[in-house]
Amino acid sequence: MIFDLHNDFPTVKHNFDEYLSTECCGNIVTAAIWTTEFDTETAAVTIRNITDRLSCGIVSARCPIAIEDVGCLEYNDEYLSFDFTKYLYCSLTWNYDNGFAGGALSGGTLTEKGRRLVSLLNGCGCAVDLAHLNERSFFETMEIAERPICSHTGFNSHPRSLDDVQISALVARNALIGLCAVKAFTDARTKIEFADIIDRFVQKYGIDNLSFGTDFCGSVDLPPDLSDYGALATVASILSRRGYSPRDIDKIYYKNAERLLAMET
């Protein structure tokens, strides 16, 4: 089984049940509602409507919901009355600055509204996603977030990736880090090179904080042999041949991520 911390399918797929049942069968796939291009005046309603659709039918059983970029909820201060209890995590921004924080490709900082938002998320038990934040906003947000995670990222020099200091800080907080499949953030051109990244992470930081946040449906910049869950499942055999035990592989594939949902301790 795979627990994916980040899949953008609600943005691009019309039939949620069909996608989940045919392409994600047997896996837990977090439905990340990417809001950056939503009309700000109607964004809150759009998010609620998508959430309602995701909460019905076969989707709801194995489909946690998250919000990627809550910047649209700054409009009329809608974030103050928005019900965040339905979401596994929320991220403050996307790649650019908004009224809450600074994005990975910009120079902004965590604002007073951003601090208020993090406090609201803390209060309702919603994890705070540090993906897409620039370095300054990352550390400012981590300092006050009770449940920080980084849902989908890589470990190279790209501004969207995490460096050693950020990874170490997350591990010190026992936070989850979702490794994405996007080549620009990993430099992995094949699933073997993707396994190499996993191996280097585990050797340096241990195995208890690594998970997957594939960014499937959010990017086409994927290794040709690592573009769906069937392909991702085969990486387990590569890790097995390198000496990883079934227990360790299960941790990376789903058990570490289950902690976020408090399925297991």
Image (cartoon, rainbow, N blue to C red):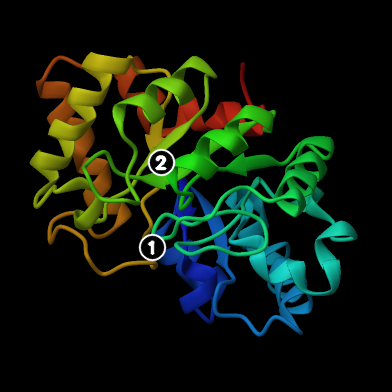
User: Extreme right residue here?
Assistant: 81
Marker disc for residue 124: none
Residue at point 84%, 67% (across, down): 78
Residue behind mark 2 = 2
User: How far apart are labels 2 and 1 at the CA level?
Assistant: 12 Å
Observer-nearest of 236 and 198: 198
Q: Residue 175: give x, y in percent of width and height.
A: 52, 26
Residue at point 53%, 34% (across, down): 139
The amino acid marked with disc number 2 is Ile
Q: Is residue 76 above or below residue 222?
A: below
Mark 1, Cα crowd under 10 Å, few <14 / some 14-19 / many 20+, is few
Q: Residue 1: give x, y in percent of width and height.
A: 41, 38
Mark 2, Cα crowd under 10 Å, few <14 / some 14-19 / many 20+, is many
Q: Is residue 245 visible?
A: no
Q: In this view, does 95 lie above or below 229?
A: below
Q: Can residue 232 be seen in this view?
A: yes
Residue behind mark 1 = 23
Residue at point 75%, 67% (across, down): 74
Q: Residue 113: give x, y in percent of width and height.
A: 76, 53
